[in-house]
Image (spheres, rainbow, N blue to C red):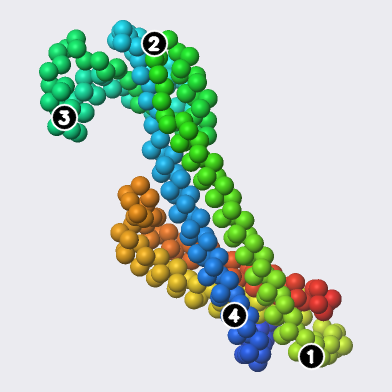
Amino acid sequence: MKLFRMLRRHIRDAFKSVFRNFSLSVASITCITITLIIVGLSIIASLNLKNFTTEIEEDVTMIVFLDADTTEEQISTLTVEINSIPNVEEVKFKSKNTSKNEMMQESDFFKETMSTWGEGDNPLKDSFQVKVKDIEKIADTAEEIRDMDKVSVVNYGEEMVNNLISAFSMIQKVAIIMVVALIVVTIFLIINTIKLTIFSRKREISIMRLVGASNVSIKIPFLIEGLILGFIGSIIPIVVIIYGYTALYNHLGGVVYSNLITLIQPEPFVYIASLIILGIGMLVGMVGSAGAVRKYLKV
């Protein structure tokens, strides 16, 4: 019970401090709000980029063309061998007649040309469509399939895929570094802003120490105050994320430029992002307060 009474008193003192030092509290909240908006936008951009990268990776398909004289028994054997490769997720066989019919449906020119082909005139090749689990290992997987008997050509757009992997990997790393850097800057700004608040109450804290207040009892109200400032400072960024992202998604119809680049659906994405921002705001507020108390007052 004593612990709860002490905690209740610390929370009460923290709220009183926020309103008693209103101008400095507003400065801290403004600092947190502006930075968290930028952090929130960076998180949204980073997660959408990761989603786009994942979709691209899932759509990458390796086409394995077979020799013209490949028998059905050899096709069955190849199916088993390709499926046995650890990085292979899915294998689909497509006969040359199926490829011919699909091409005829796509173009009148193909339809007119290919309709004259007899059973033995089809120059297309039987093939496998192979999807891999890890796109970064696709080159090794393709090389392993090339070495198999009756495999003629393996094609997956090697140069384009490698360029995409490199570009997306670099962009994701930059986005993570930006988010971390912004959080560090936020902590630094909050520490310096809260230092002003602590300096204005230096006499009050000195009296508390003279009457026997422990270091913990002095620190806790500041930690709670930082948590409160972080919570209040997170409100506007959360509103911006929920309503801003939803409006953007609806305005663009969920796609950017083309159906190739799709945005993450707002629900539950915006709520998860909001919880992340709220957690960062409250944590940063507490860390900022703790840093100001420890480094400035040497409590």
Up the image or down, 187 lies above or below 135; here it is: below
Residue 150 is labelled as 2
Residue 29 is labelled as 4
Among numbered discs 3 and 2, the one appearing first in the sequence: 3
Q: Nearer the viewer, residue 155 or 188?
A: 155
Q: Name the residue that disc number 1 marks.
A: 204
- In percent of width and height, residue 82 lies at 43, 19
Q: Amino acid under label 1? A: Glu
- Residue at 81% in and 91% down: 203
Quadrant location of the C terminus?
Answer: bottom right
Among numbered discs 1 and 2, the one appearing first in the sequence: 2
Q: Amino acid under label 4? A: Ile
Q: Amino acid under label 2? A: Lys
Asked if disc 3 and disc 2 are in contact, CB closer than 8 Å, the reply is: no
Among numbered discs 2 and 4, the one appearing first in the sequence: 4
- In percent of width and height, residue 22 lies at 62, 90
Q: Is residue 91 visible?
A: no
- In percent of width and height, residue 119 lies at 17, 12
Tell me: 208 left or right of 82.
right
Q: Nearer the viewer, residue 296 or 61?
A: 61
- Measured in 3D between alpha carbons, the distance from the residue under mark 1 to the one under mark 2, in whole angstroms, is 85 Å
Of labels 1 and 3, the one closer to you:
3
